[in-house]
Amino acid sequence: MPVRTQLTRFLAACLASAAVLASVLPGTGCASAAKTRATERTRILRDQRITRAQLEEMSNAFADRYFTLMLGASERVMRDNPDVQQCRIMNGLRVLGVSSMYDIATAPDTLTQLVDQLVVVTLQNYFWVDSGRSQKIWGERAQPIVEALRRAREDVWTLASKVFTDDQLEDLDLLVATWWSRNGGTDFVAYVRFSEIASTKGEALIEKVRSGDGLLEPIDRATEQAEEARFALERSFFWTKRVPLFANWLVMALMYDVLAVPDLQRVINSVEIISHTAATMPDRVNLVSERVGSVEQTATVLVDRVFRNVLILVIAVFVGIYGVILLRRRKAS
């Protein structure tokens, strides 16, 4: 065989081999590059870990952000709305959501605060937004609450990305979605906590992040007790300042019950429920104040302040009931 022919065949074989390699290597290269980029991102973030104190501040800030979103959206849904039932449901949604968010923000464990906030907001989106339930209840008025809940979900997952790696976020998302697929439909998603949906894998994930296998600075068990006392006092102030912001919504809940439910006995039952809710407010302050032995006097002042607010609220509720009873008697006569 002529040398020229052999050389031609050799070059053709080389070109064919190069084409095969070119078709295989780009995919592998992209996957490898993507993995490298993800690893590099995690390394950079770990070099900029956030502290427990920073996480506490972010959790509190998100609770206030959630309150602002719910306040603005609910006012738009309820303003000039002639449908009492729509207003009643909207008021109930914001009372449960905001009280739950502040309850979470005053919980003792900082990392659990974030995870519980993520769980509540995600489940609220499943229940009210993704299912289309908001549109069924409020019709054209539903858009503000839909936008508010979606924004809250974006914000809380962005916050979580500062603490959890991408893989850990995927695991959290799967845990919440799996629980919802099995238990979806419950009305009181605002009071579902991570401890209720977490499997053994979920609990192990939180412990890993707590020990430094995430983007949060490892929590030093030796200094945790001392820090807890300081955080408890700060949470007392945080809770006390924010109770009056939504306490009037409890009175509004009673008013809507009176308008929507004419049965007086059911109205009285509503008063008992509201009074019980209000009565737990000073208990919350007592709970966190007991952790602060060195500032007992300051904590007592906080408890007294909240107690006065609750007392005013309870008096207002019973004055309202008394007025309803008098009105009914006049109509009857």
Image (cartoon, grey):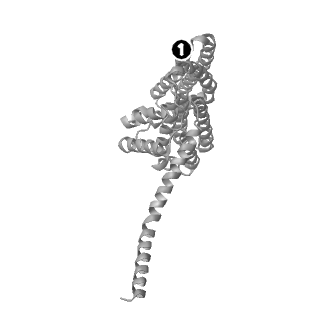
* Side of 167 where 43 appears, left or right: right
* Side of 82 where 268 appears, left or right: left
Q: Residue furthest bottom?
A: 2
Q: Residues within 10 Å of mark 1 (few under 14, many from 20)?
A: some
Q: Nearer the viewer, residue 31 or 75?
A: 31
The secondary structure type at the circle numbered 1 is loop
* Residue 160 in the image, given as x and y percentages of width and height: 53, 40
* Residue 72 in the image, given as x and y percentages of width and height: 63, 41
* Residue 144 in the image, given as x and y percentages of width and height: 59, 47
* Side of 183 where 296 appears, left or right: right
Residue 153 drawn above or below residue 22: above
Q: What residue lies at 42% left-to-right and 84% top-to-bottom? A: 8
Q: Quadrant of residue 223?
A: top right
Q: Quadrant of residue 44?
A: top right
Q: How many marks?
A: 1
Q: Quadrant of residue 177?
A: top left
Q: Nearer the viewer, residue 77 or 179?
A: 179
Identify residue type, mark 1. Glu
Q: Nearer the viewer, residue 74 or 4?
A: 4
Q: Quadrant of the N terminus?
A: bottom left
Task: Confirm whether residue 241 shows in the render.
Answer: yes
Q: Nearer the viewer, residue 266 or 296?
A: 296
What residue is disc 1 on? 290
Task: Confirm whether residue 284 shows in the render.
Answer: no
Residue 272 drawn above or below residue 1: above
* Residue 211 in the image, given as x and y percentages of width and height: 48, 31
